[in-house]
Amino acid sequence: MQLGASHSDEEIDESHYTNREGTVEAALLESFFDESHPMPVSAELKRIQENQARHIHLPWYQKPSTFLICLLIMLIALAETLYMTPIIIITKDKVCESISNGQIKGEETICDPIKVQTILSEISSMTIIISGVISTFMAGKMGELSDRFGRVHVFIYIGLIRLLGNAAHVYALWPSTTYYKWFIILAGSLNSFSGGMYAIIANANSYLSDIVEPENRSVSFGKVTSALFATMGVGFLLASNIVTLFHGNNFAPIYFAISCSSLFILLCLFFIKETRHEDSLRDSQEAFGRRMDKHFERLMADIESAERPGLAGKIYLYGHYYTNQALHLLSPLKTLWIPRDSNGSLRGRHTVILLLVIDIAYVCSTTACMPPLILLTTYKYNWQTVEIGYFVSFSGISKAVVLLLLSPYIVAWLKKIYTACTDKVDNIDMICIRISMVAIVFGISAIIFKTESESSVIGFALFQAFSAFLSPTIQSTVIKYCPKDRTGQCFGGMALVRSLTMLVFPPLLLKIYGATVAGSPEVFLWIPMIASIISVVLSLMIKTH
């Protein structure tokens, strides 16, 4: 595994296609969908090579590459951060206006800050719950759609949904729009139909898996992750500066966010080329068709032999059928249930399960705890859009610096001691994971035990920077065990696990924060603290090769 090496996967020459096959595992992987009939690994890799060969003569701005996918991620992340920073303050002002009963001091509306924080936590938690349910179903589905229709089509869909969702949310918070709590909640949930940021990253990794050799994928995943962190850092900083430049207008960054989303869609429509081979697209579509036909035939057989005659029986059977179709959205999880290896061992399955549990703890301790943490800074330190922007910018940029500048030296040093493995978890992977989780424990401790000081939040961000190792490491490690012809579904499964995590923990942490804000607002941080400690212990149970 390499997170920050400077290898270039974009430069492809003709000799590349004649010598690569011998370096890749050629064994057949056991199918997890009996009706899918997955192709041999070598056949899928040959299709990837053919696809690469067709792209070799394209100009640089159209040739599939890590650079182009990083550009797309940077655009969508910039749009997200420009939108996210001011929306917190805009929502806070909207809530304050609704409960103020017209009380104004100077140019500021007077309202009870405790009541505002309580309502804000309710809005945030309900939005996260609804968004989490939708994202949970959509994140896994995006992986399957990516395999069936192509990576670029999924990017276009995601861009359109996020553009429309952001516009609806802004309208709900517009000063002239009447305040309705549930209108704000529902409008803020529309973005989740894109599957969330995890679905975007999963689709980006699927795109890279089509053009990058297995041994170099962790490098490319690391580049995408660092592009995401760096852009989020710059985006929040840029949002703060835009607000200052436009004399405190919190809506100004949102206009720039809409422009970035529009540019993202235009690039996907006219410049980004599809990387998934047409034969692979056809095979995935045919496998899906066979699966749907089999389910429908079973439904018809049930109707013919139904014990419940008449309309009631048909309603019951059709309800059962469509319930199964809805549950099918969770099917990408099956790709993460690794079958026995050739020796009958379940070691691979146990390793992947432990890695996913660690990933859940990581999400709980980083992304999931950010909404209540931001609310805590607005309450405890009276932070506004500018201060929030600086904090999140510092956090994102520091992670990118660690990933791009520090990790290559750490990995190079570790490779002198340990042997890297391309098809199983190795010591390099596990050391990077443990460094990340231990850093998170120290970061959360800084806030818990020094809540009264604003510097504790900076300490939190510094320690969190070293958690940047974990995300690309876990994804590149899990993908070692997955079927090579179902990379989209595998990444979709991991995105689904993260979406399920975001469905549970942010509302829980916000609920705890809302209940304890008047006394000890930092109490919610004990949950990610305990989860991080448990993940460190679990990492010691993973056997390396």
Image (cartoon, grey):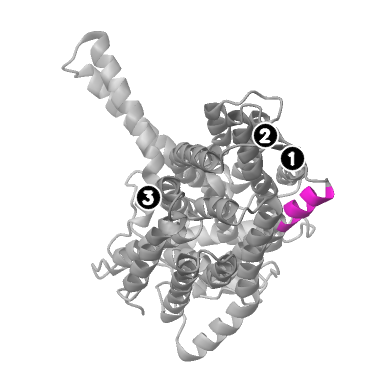
Name, please, the residue furthest toward the left.
307
> Sequence order check: which comes first, mark 2 or mark 1?
2
CB within 8 Å, label 2 to label 1: yes
Q: Which mark is residue 251?
A: 1
Q: Amino acid at mark 2?
A: Val
Q: Which mark is residue 333?
A: 3
CB within 8 Å, label 2 to label 3: no
What residue is rendered at 33% in x and 61% in y?
Answer: 353
Q: Mark 1 falls on what kind of element?
A: loop
Q: Main secondary structure of the magenta part?
A: helix
Q: Which residue is mark 2?
A: 170
Q: Is residue 392 visible?
A: yes
Comparing 395 with 485, the one in front is 395
Q: Amino acid at mark 1?
A: Phe
Q: Is residue 481 left or right of residue 279?
A: left
Disc 2 versus disc 3: distance between alpha carbons? 34 Å
What residue is rendered at 71% in x and 25% in y?
Answer: 176
Q: Quadrant of the C terminus?
A: bottom left
Rendered location of residue 36, percent (x, y): 38, 46
CB within 8 Å, label 1 to label 3: no
Q: Residue 87 is drawn in which quadrant?
A: top right
Q: Residues within 10 Å of mark 3 (few under 14, many from 20)?
A: some
Rendered location of residue 529, percent (x, y): 40, 65
The span shown in magenta is 237-245
User: Above or below — where is 318 with respect to 249?
Assistant: above
Rendered location of residue 223, percent (x, y): 63, 66
Q: Amino acid at mark 3?
A: Leu
Disc 2 versus disc 1: distance between alpha carbons? 8 Å
Q: Is residue 398 magenta?
A: no
Q: Mark 2 falls on what kind of element?
A: helix
Q: Mark 3 falls on what kind of element?
A: helix
